[in-house]
Amino acid sequence: MAAHFGRRLRKGAATTAVAAAAVAALSASQAPGVTVDDHGRQTSADTTPSPDEAASSATGNSPYYTDLPPLKSPNPSPSASADPDTPAGAAEAGIPATVLDAYKKAEAALRAKKPACNLPWQLLAAIGRVESGQARGGRVSADGTTLSPIIGPQLDGNGFALIKDTDNGVYDGNSRYDNAVGPMQFIPSTWAWAGRDGNGDGREDPNNIYDAALAAGHYLCRNGWDLSDQSDLNRAILSYNNSTDYLNTVLRWLEYYRKGTHEIPDGTGTLPSDRSDDGTRRPGTTPSPSTPGTGNGTKPEKPSGNSPSPKPPTSPGGSPSKPPTSPSTPPETPQTPTDTVDHLEDAGTAKLTAMAGDAFTKRISTRAETESGKSVAKVRIRFTLVGDTDTTFAGGERVATVVTNSSGVAVAPALQAGEKTGTVTVRATVAGRTVPGLDYRATVTERAADTLVRTDDTKLTCVPGGEFADPVVVKATYDGAVADKVAATATLVKSADDPTANDKGPYFKDADGKPVRTLGGLTTDADGLLKLPQLYADDTTGTFLLRITTAGGATLTVELTVAAAETSSPSPSPSA
């Protein structure tokens, strides 16, 4: 990065307040040389991450573009003279139309889904610029799909993290190792749970800017982060690519776009040239014009023929030292804890049951083990909700990743039951390694009440052929708490011992005005209250019973009286 900053400064322009603000914000939020991963742990900055750490990021810590924003404001005043040193400034400030639309639609979706996250579309634009140069300058089709796939280098441990294949080559065409894919550069193992359908075509395609932007928004808004808070913003960006240089670059573009940008036609955006891997060509992208390692586009000079041959270094005793390892023979990649995992075992998970809308009181526990049954610590276990269910983990996510503790156990976040009842499947897998998953079954039962009471004790009476003046209102509770959204049924029964519907006496009316004596599909409101429709009486007098029942077994029987109106007798006439 120092070289890239130097190139900018050598152009004769001073550092902007934008850069100072970004770096100051970073310095204020965390110690120098320290980054924070997606679990809030501090790690040394820009060290080579372990495969486990890389697999937990959106990009697998793949290379990225390090070009910095133009030093001029993106919205220069009309009187400002053109700067011949930065002719592409206006173009760099612009964002291709379809790409810009995708960012703004993703922001709107997250504002509705997770308003507390405060995701700005400019953050997506900054990451999109750094990851793919805004989808290679907006080279996308009308529906937002890149005209050709954007594939990063294979993450085989040679200069990059080691992430073995997790998608059988479906997204990246590589069945040995993973590659980052698409305009937002997701690795397949992350896309498997973070992928979203942003353009409504029924597919989750990492090469579609609408899908990728929405997925990136959800990824940045997990863990309850508030992106208007600088420390949370830093954590979110670092979770995308765990590098302080990456963080600084994204923050610079974020502030640049916040100062203003404009829409440009698709396919006309500028393509970045400087990359964090010093010019290594990313498949399907335009290579940097500079020769790797020189930073200035010139070829390194060949040594003169008169130059003496370098002598091998000697040890203090005078004997030649062991020659360094040939760069063509990379050192063997050390085995990580993840590589030793053979299978997953349940770690004593209790029965998982919850009522619709409630949180599960029990949590899933999974242990990672070697082939011999030894526990493995520091392994990332991914818990994924499978199938058509609205049950989620706390926070509304369908996927959670947890690191195993010293006992090799990962405890999933609490489950939050949705409204769909039935069996829910949670699958535990090892992030970054292909071993059989472990499925857990959780049961969501319908909402229930165990007590029903009337809200008043007014006697319910009516004259034959008339209407009951007072409505029937009851309140439902469960374990003393309000029982909301509970299904209920109201029936005019024949007697206390005969629950069948009566064929005479009080009745309700259906949509056609015809008498009905059983009403189903009733539901208590948010306060647990249920107000029954208007009751009517036929010409039969007497005492009748209305029985109300709810899911969960709560029952209440209410008396209804139909009697002729009382008439006063005439006063006797005076005697003669």
Image (cartoon, rainbow, N blue to C red):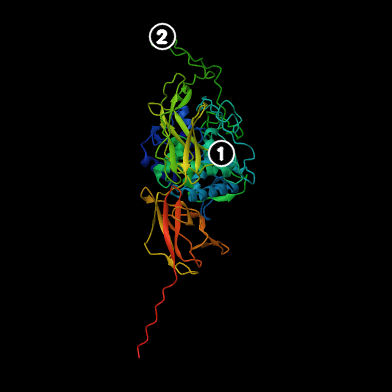
Residue picked out by circle 1 = 132
Q: Based on the displayed image, in which of its 4 quarters is residue 35 positioned?
A: top left
- In the picture, measured across the screen, residue 163 lies left or right of residue 232, that is right
Q: Quadrant of the C terminus?
A: bottom left
Q: Is residue 523 above or below residue 407?
A: below
How many residues crowd around disc 1 within 10 Å: few (fewer than 14), some, or many (20 or more)?
many
Q: Residue at x 44, y 31 (%)?
A: 46
Assign a secondary structure to mark 1: helix
- 526 or 522, which lies in front? 522
Residue 172 % position (x, y): 59, 32
Mark earlier in primary sequence (2, 1):
1
The residue labelled by disc 2 is 318
Residue 383: x and y in percent read 47, 34
**Amino acid beneath label 1:** Ser
Crowding around mark 2 (Cα neighbors within 10 Å: few <14, some 14 to 19, many 20+) is few
Q: CA separation, marks 2 and 1? A: 52 Å
Q: Position of residue 433 (x, y in %)?
A: 51, 27
